DNA sequence: TATTTTTTTTAGACTTGTCTAAATTAATTA
DNA sequence: TAATTAATTTAGACAAGTCTAAAAAAAATA
């Protein structure tokens, strides 16, 4: 249907659009690991196919069919990640690269069966929502732990940084998804946070707090 | 590591070499769905990389490293087929195309975990042996049902034709892998076979018999 | 063995996706 | 608003893999 490469561009644009109004050439180049000149070429092609809205120098948005494809890729990526962690017992910091390949397996029947096989999970191992077969997903309103106030309580629901280093840090300190935590202190000096769950106390930096997404 | 395309050529050569001494340019073209001229180009590249033994006009064989890669692809293909049938409940005539894509997912750790997840199966849904992680497989000596004599008994162990049409025919007539059958009659007129298992009688053509592989 | 047929290879071109370098447009700052 | 800087696009080239048409080699046949 669409090439591996086209799918990656659409996915990258989709993720960028979650943060900003329109995705720029340079942003897309950074996200796809290519150069701006290559991006311009591809944008023309995607616009030709009516998958993006593109006007020179103006950045891009996805058309409905472009977004449908992008969401389909995201669905596959997250379902495969869930499979790798839940069924094959990989750790959550090990699955990204594999899912980057698996998300391009074309069969939608396959992905629907995989979804059912796992009991239609709503979230992937990093807490990101998994779109259903119609592209709908459970978009919870999450906020960075950085913005929690003293004595506020919430549940760790997702992570904003998917790097193995960050995930391994959380794994080691036991700050994992699903934990309910309370802010017991905001350090005056560096504004680091002290968190508490029922069992332990965690002293986390602002950088770590920024990447912990909390359901209040 | 190696491109999708290179892997497909090596796999095609591997399968051809199971039937003949050396694989020819035209055979490879037919197997890969390309033209002879394209094959020649690729053979040069694979020879350059020491994955095949190639001399102009002489056909090719696989080097040890070429064979190792090919067997790895076959392993992946057959394990994914097993997964699709055993876990996701696809029918045996539905899985080939999906496995053609899945066999190129690069991670060997993934395939090893999948292997374990399924309990290290020895055969795929079509009865073909699955290489283990060292490339070794259970190569049973099978013979075509065409060569069975009257009153001879054996077990249907694999199929030589993987086309959906043939597989669906077998499914419908209940001539499935694992069945023990006996030849009760060889029709004089057209040499068609009459088979029997404990429950039913099957009247099969020579064409069908040719593609049923029997463990005597 | 000479000729014909088949197979394989070479030559040159095309497509997809990429790049660098240069040109253009937009944005920022003085 | 003019000048500078940053972002984007264009132009031209390259690599991988494919093709068609023509040439060369091998195999088959007379």
Image (cartoon, coloured by chain):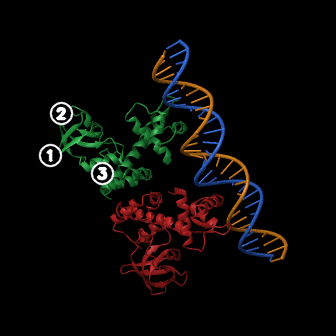
Chain colours: A red, B green, C blue, D orange
A215 over B85 or under it: above or below: below
- What residue is pinned by disc 2? B150
Label pair 1/3, CB-CB below 8 angstroms: no
The chain under label 3 reads B
Nearest-to-viewer mark from 1 and 3? 1
- What residue is pinned by disc 3? B120
Please tell me how crowded label 2 is: few (under 14), some (14-19), or many (20+) other residues with Cα within 10 Å.
Answer: some
Q: CA distance from mark 2 to mark 3?
A: 37 Å
Label pair 2/3, CB-CB below 8 angstroms: no
A108 over B165 or under it: above or below: below
The chain under label 2 reads B
Residue A47 in view, yes or no: yes
Q: Position of residue A59 (x, y in %)?
A: 64, 68
- What residue is pinned by disc 1? B198
Earlier residue among tags 1 and 3: 3
Earlier residue among tags 2 and 1: 2
SS at mark 3 in the image: loop
Q: Residue at x 36, y 69 (%)?
A: A120
Left or right: where A205 falls relative to A117: right
SS at mark 1 in the image: loop
Q: Residue at x 60, y 64 (%)?
A: A28
> Of A49 and B185, which appears nearest the observer?
B185
Left or right: where A52 falls relative to B121: right
Q: Residue furthest bottom?
A: A151
């Amino acid at each position: 249907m669409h090439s591996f490469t086209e799918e990656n561009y659409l996915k990258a644009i989709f993720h960028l659009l979650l943060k900003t109004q329109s995705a720029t050439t340079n942003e897309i180049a950074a996200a796809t690991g290519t150069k701006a000149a290559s991006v311009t070429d591809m944008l023309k092609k995607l616009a030709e196919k009516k998958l993006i809205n593109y006007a020179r120098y103006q950045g891009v948005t996805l058309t409905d069919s472009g977004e449908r494809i992008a969401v389909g890729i995201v669905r596959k990526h997250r379902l495969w990640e869930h499979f790798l962690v839940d069924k094959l017992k990989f750790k959550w910091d090990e699955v990204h690269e594999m899912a980057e390949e698996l998300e391009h397996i074309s069969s939608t029947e396959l992905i629907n069966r995989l979804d059912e096989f796992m009991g239609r999970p709503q979230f992937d191992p990093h807490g990101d929502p998994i779109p259903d077969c119609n592209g709908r997903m459970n978009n919870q309103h999450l906020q960075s732990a950085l913005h929690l106030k003293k004595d506020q309580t919430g549940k760790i629901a997702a992570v904003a940084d998917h790097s193995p280093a960050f995930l391994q840090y959380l794994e080691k300190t036991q700050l994992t998804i699903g934990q309910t935590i309370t802010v017991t202190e905001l350090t005056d000096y560096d504004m680091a946070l002290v968190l508490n769950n029922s069992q332990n106390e965690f002293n986390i930096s602002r950088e770590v707090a920024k990447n912990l997404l909390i359901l209040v």
